[in-house]
Image (cartoon, helix red, strand yellow):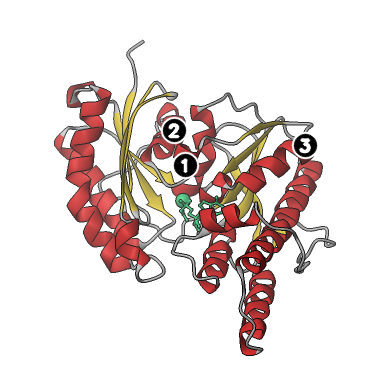
Amino acid sequence: MKDNYILAFETSCDETSVAVLKNGTTLLSNVIASQINSHKRFGGVVPEVASRHHVEQITACIDEALLQANVEVSDLSAVAVTQGPGLVGALLIGIMAAKTFAWANQLPLIPVNHMAGHLMAASLVDTIEYPAMALLVSGGHSELVYVEKEGSYKKVGETRDDAVGEAYDKVGRVMGLTYPSGKAVDELAHQGQDTYHFPRAMMNTHDIEFSFSGLKSAFINTVHHAEQKGEDLVKDDLRNLAASFQAAVLDVLIGKTKLALEKYPVKTLIVGGGVSANQGLRERLQLDVTDVKVIVPPLRLCGDNAGMIAAAAYVEWQRQNFSGLDLNAKPSLVF
Ligand code: KG4
Ligand code: ZN
């Protein structure tokens, strides 16, 4: 059978990425142009700035992805692109580029849900045995998704308020860390102890839902009270604050994931999204989730990248799930 090559585009937030995937599992290239330095000084992603960077970067990323993959345009089988969720202006740049490329080269166009991408990143490193459960934790989303069989995604629980990554970034900001601060908070947490005992929301409810805004507020209030009393937070306090925050987050994530696994027996647990880079989460998963196969992709596939979009697109390609050139962005796309 003819080899399959998918050229995928990801521009939903602040990374411009283009990848080439061969036969669904061999990632030939995964070019990522990060804009993070342009957003740092604003303490978050500025949508207009993100769109402008995507426009500037996308063509060079396409050329580089094809070059690194050593693939000719005539070899390609399809073009895939993130349709949502994400920032509308940012998504539209990837969609326009993908549509143009598909039209000019007469290739089918595959729209991809960004969260399906985070989930299917696991398929690039291991075999997903179905049914599977996915814990998806990123800057914009925190959810548990049941995948009965390949390509059939059903959200079974989500956050009621903040996403986990968002909470990490907010507490990091209060501690004076640069955006995005998830990694720095994770590193500090490893040097401290859970001395503050922050609340673990909804741990005793039997629904698969998270809430992180109470934890975030408890953290911020603790820091502000100390400041009002004129207490200087020394390095040890920051370490213990980070460790206490992370311990509360992980208790909730692991607790709710175990509840989901009880309600929906599966063969594989997939963990995806930017927060799956968290070392504490990886350690807890190893200790606490032992009765199913666990796939946590390597760090390079945890953050936003087009390789994961190509992996999710391959499932749709097999089903011939193509879209017309009237494809539009869906900033609030859900499973
Ligand atoms: O999936 P992603 O790259 O972008 C979105 O789609 O949101 O996730 C980015 C998020 C940020 O909030 C960042 O702080 C968080 O992932 N993050 C981490 C770690 N590395 C990145 N959070 C906790 N621990 C980490 N090691
Ligand atoms: Zn993401």
* Marks 3 & 1, CB-CB < 8 Å contact: no
How far apart marks 2 and 3 lie (CA) works out to 24 Å
Return the x and y of residue 143 as percentages of the image width and height: 62, 53
For label 1, the residue is 117
For label 2, the residue is 311
The kind of residue tagged 3 is Pro
Pick whichever of labels 2 and 3 is earlier in the sequence: 3
Please say if 74 is above or below 260: above
Q: Residue at x 33, y 16 (%)?
A: 3
- The reply to whether residue 123 is visible in this rendering is yes
User: Ligand 2 closer than 8 Å to the CB at disc 1?
Assistant: yes
Residue placed most toward the observer, 328 or 15:
15
The kind of residue tagged 1 is Gly
- Left or right of residue 302, residue 77 in this image: left
Q: Place residue 330 in its image quadrant.
A: bottom left
The kind of residue tagged 2 is Ala
Residue placed most toward the observer, 286 or 289:
286
Return the x and y of residue 218 as percentages of the image width and height: 69, 75
Q: Residue at x 73, y 34 (%)?
A: 266
Return the x and y of residue 76 as percentages of the image width and height: 25, 25
Element carrying mark 2: helix
Element carrying mark 1: helix
How far apart marks 2 and 1 lie (CA) works out to 7 Å
Pick whichever of labels 3 and 1 is earlier in the sequence: 1
For label 3, the residue is 265
Pick whichever of labels 2 and 1 is earlier in the sequence: 1
Quarter of the figure with the N terminus: top left
